Image (cartoon, rainbow, N blue to C red):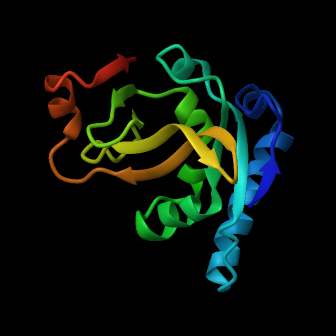
Amino acid sequence: MRAVQLPANLYETLSYDPLAADNYKALVAVLINSEVAGKPQHEVVLELGPTPDILVQHGFPQLPLVLKAKNISKMFFDHGMTKGLIERIPDLIANPKAIYKSTTTGSVLVTFEVKGMQSAPIIIAIHPNKTIGRNRITNEVASMYAKTGPNPEIRWRQDGLLIWER
């Protein structure tokens, strides 16, 4: 797999450096456009920088946070996430509405609100300690999707899965 290196402090950089934010947005656009053109780049891994403090403070290891191109494709084409939402992933993860333990894997589910989508919370699944390539350990952004139907956050709270809430 080819790793695309973004600045080590992406979360701070995106807030203060328009060029880093533009680079990440450009990479997302290139990956989506290559898929549309029939030439997917699924082997590309975007390194988003260190895992945000909010996740580290709640049990995540301090490892690089990565996003595979194949997951960007899945978010956009299979789950209907907009390019704009995918472009905001680093900021959304760093500023979640809530963090929950997953009921099925060792991952954590990060939720956030999108104006106009109150009925469908957006969920980002993040897998800790994920091996990428031969032996590189990372925290991987595995998916982002809108949860339709009844809001699962009520049930997750009742089941004791809430880790943190804003």
Residue 32: image x %, image y %? 64, 69
Q: Quadrant of residue 37?
A: bottom right
Pick out the residue farthest to the bottom. 38
The mark tally for this picture is: 0
Q: Identify whether 74 is placed above or below 160.
A: below
Residue 162 placement, left or right of 17: left
Q: Is residue 142 visible?
A: yes
Which residue is painted at 64% across and 61% down in the image? 69
Q: Nearer the viewer, residue 90 or 128?
A: 128
Q: Is residue 88 visible?
A: no
Q: Nearer the viewer, residue 31 or 128?
A: 128
Q: Quadrant of residue 17?
A: top right
Q: Identify whether 15 is placed above or below 47.
A: above
Which residue is painted at 82% across and 39% down in the image? 18
Residue 20 placement, left or right of 69: right
Residue 89: image x %, image y %? 58, 43
Which residue is painted at 79% across and 28% down in the image? 16
Figure quadrant of the N terminus: bottom right
Q: Quadrant of residue 130?
A: top right
Figure quadrant of the C terminus: top left
Residue 130 placement, left or right of 63: left
Residue 26: image x %, image y %? 77, 58
Q: Nearer the viewer, residue 17 or 127?
A: 127
Residue 156: image x %, image y %? 21, 31
Q: Identify whether 93 is placed above or below 54.
A: below
Q: Nearer the viewer, residue 141 or 27?
A: 141
